[in-house]
Every structure is written in C-alpha cells, then in structure tokens.
Amino acid sequence: MKKLKAIIISLVLVLTVCSLSACQIFFTEFPPEKTETPQGTINVSDVNINYSTITPDREKGDLVEAVAKVYDSVVCIENLTSTQIGEGCGVIVDVSVITEDNTEEENCFYVLTCFHVIEGADELKIKLADDNLNYSYVFSSKNFAVSLVGGDDKTDIAILKLDISNNTYGLTKNDITVAKLMDVRNTNLVLGEDVFAIGNPSGTLPGSVTKGIVSYINRDVEIEGNPMTLLQIDAALNQGNSGGGLFNLYGELVGMVNGGNVSYEGLNFAIPLEVGEIKEDETGIIKIMTDLIKTQTENSYGYVEGRWQLGVVVTEGSTYGPFGAQEKYVYVHTIVEGGAISKATSSNGAKIKEGYIIDAVEIDGVKTAITDLASFETVYAKMQQNFKIGDTFKLHLRERYSSLSTTAFTVSIEQFIYNPNFN
C-alpha cells in the first residue's frame, strides 16, 4: 500500500455546532467509555413543569424588571478536560421531581443546558452569581454537587442536577432563583416579540444581557447533520452563550440559546419550548427535558426513548494498484467499548476487531456493497431513519485488504444512553 488517505466519520456521539455555533466547542474525537454507576441519579416517579401563572391578558414589564426576575437563574458552566476548558451557560428551571417513594429531593435543582456544552467533560463546574453579580459560587462534579441527569445529542439538550446541600457558602434553597417556563398550553410566542438573552460571551463576560426580537418561528435548520426546528432571533450572541436562557419581557423562559450563523450577521438561534406543530418526534425543550429527567434511575442516566448508536468510527482508505488505479475501502478505525459493534458476533462467536475491512452491509437479507465512505454513509442514513431498538443487521468484514475471505457479524441495535467520563 503506497498511499493511505484517511477520512474519518464518527458514527458515535460527537455533536459539534460548526457554522451554527454560540458556545465554546469541545472536540472529542472518540466518546468516553461507559463509567460505573452514575452519581446523583434517582428513581423518578413523576416530573412536573411549573409554568408561569401570568395570565394571557397581562401587561408586559420593561426590560429592567424582566431581567431582574430571572438574572440569577442563568449560570455559567465550565467543561474541563485534560487539555482544555470550555465555557457555556445553563438555566435553573422550575421543575418538581417526585421520587419513587413519593418525596421531593431536598436542596436539588435542575439545570437546563446544551448537550455540546457538557459533552466530553472530565469535570463540570456550575457557577452562580452572588449579590454583586460576580459568579463566585462554584459547584463541581468532583464532589457530586453537580451531576449529569441525562443528555441527548440529537436535540442538543442536556440536564444537570445541582445539589447545594452542606455548601460552604451558606446558600439555602430560598437563595436560588429558578426560571419559570412560558405556559405553552395557553400562550404562544409571536413574530416580532421582544426577547432577551443572558449568557457568557467568549467565556469571559458572564451575565451579559442582549436584547432582540423573534425573527422567525419554527425555522428548520441542520446542525452537524441533525435537523432541528429552532427559534430565529436577532439578539447579539457569541461563543459562550450556548445553554443560556432566552426570555420574554414577562420574565418567562421561552427558549435556550444554542446556535449562531457565521455567514449572516445578527442571525442566531434558540431551542424553543415546543416546536409549535404536531410532530411524531417532538424536539422541544419540555418534551426532551421531561424524558431525560423521568427516565433516570439509580443505575442509569436519563435518555430519550428510541435513540441509538453503533459505537464505531469508520475510516476510508485508498491504495494504488500496479497500473496506478486507485481503489478505496472502508475499515473499522475505532470500536467504543460497550457499544453495539463491540458486542457483535459471528456464527462461531468471533468479535469485530479494529482494522477489519467492511465489504457489505446486509439488511433483511439484502446486501449493499461498501466501496467507499459515501456508500457507507448512504446505508447508515437509511438505518437512522428506519431502525428501532432491537433491530438487527449484518456486517460482512474481512481481516485485511488483501484477504478475499469475509465473515458475517450480527449487530443488534441498542438504546443509546450518554455516559460521560466524569463522576
């Protein structure tokens, strides 16, 4: 093999927001391995969203009054890895979580943020504002004051839990400001409505407030291959704003900042509470947040039903024959421990190994030859649309490029649950 051209495609959990970015991005080439029993998770009986009780005929407050109501509900989030620190935001939301023994957690608060803010962290820190508007109250996952509830890369939503029990700052439950959500059951955002965002531009200006209007409702965009339906706003946003709250002038949370477009000045995006239309797969904050909180158990992080991953990184290689003809192939670059590919077996019990060449994908007895990365992407895209948890397919692999002998491995699709490498 005289030349090898590697083009890596990640089929595991890697969410970055490229041109649509309003946060410090964390490049995690390979996802963390599954950890031991998560800390901070509980068995949940019910989740109640405490909507705002302001009536539809209310009078709007001015910006100063609205900001004062919710300012302390927005927190700064630090994502620490061995090589870098990423900055983002989160919002403490007003939800009530009932455990299986019919009690509420004491001194625990749920923080809404973007998945790409917390992805790949070795440690997470939540910083709260003090009376002087300095973010001097710091809580960390190292001592379990901060814990992951669950995360969903498809909708870019994650939930953290903040436990202020026995904190050294003397903070009590009454010192924590929670954001009430706009009552989407009775109220809707309207085009042109005034909104404001609170965030941490560039990771160095925490607590910054910017004002704008709702420029478009239910804008369909694509972020790293994930179709999303978002609110389009013209409020000034920068890296570090992701996960910050978007509020109306009643002081109600109406969305969460998660993207900006570098191609158009003043064009930014936020995840809405609901997408505003009937969909089989609701992608708004309320539905995903409720799922992530409700599905957590003492032994598992929360998840959104039906999400799956293969747990593999594949790479395209190429070689030149004796007459210069280029031949491409796709091979297994990395296998994620605990993923579906790592559990796949052949008829004689053999396991897939890194370096194996993928010759074909077989679904319901029909083989599709894999000749390059594009052909694999096409098959994988169809699988994402049609496969459900428990479905199986076969990968036809060979050990090296020169080998003509292939082996069929049966792969079973499994529920995806994000397991970080902190805790």
Image (cartoon, rainbow, N blue to C red):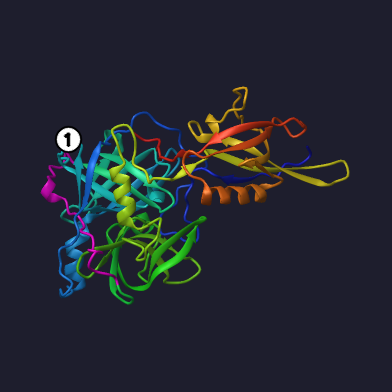
Picture coordinates of residue 235, whole percent (x, y):
35, 70
Whether 165 is among the magenta residues is yes
Q: Is residue 133 visible?
A: no
For residue 363, above or below residue 21: above
Q: Which residues are magenta?
A: 164-189
Q: Image quarter for residue 416?
A: top left
Q: Is residue 423 visible?
A: yes
Is 371 or 198 nearer to us in this picture?
A: 371
Picture coordinates of residue 301, whole percent (x, y):
34, 38
Q: Which amino acid lies under the numbered mark 1 shown in the image of this protein?
A: Asp
Q: Quadrant of the C terminus?
A: top left
Picture coordinates of residue 273, whole percent (x, y):
31, 60
Relative to 86, is 40 on the left or the right?
left
Relative to 22, is 326 on the left or the right?
right
Q: Residue at x 37, y 65 (%)?
A: 277
Label 1 packing within 10 angstroms: few (<14), some (14-19), many (20+): few
For residue 163, above or below residue 112: above
Q: Which residue is mark 1?
A: 101
Q: Residue furthest top?
A: 348
Q: Residue at x 40, y 41 (%)?
A: 121
Q: Image quarter for residue 306?
A: top left
Whether 373 is among the magenta residues is no
Q: Residue furthest bottom?
A: 192
For residue 56, above or below residue 176: below
Q: Residue furthest front?
A: 365
Q: Residue at x 52, y 42 (%)?
A: 29
Overall secondary structure of the magenta stretch?
A: loop
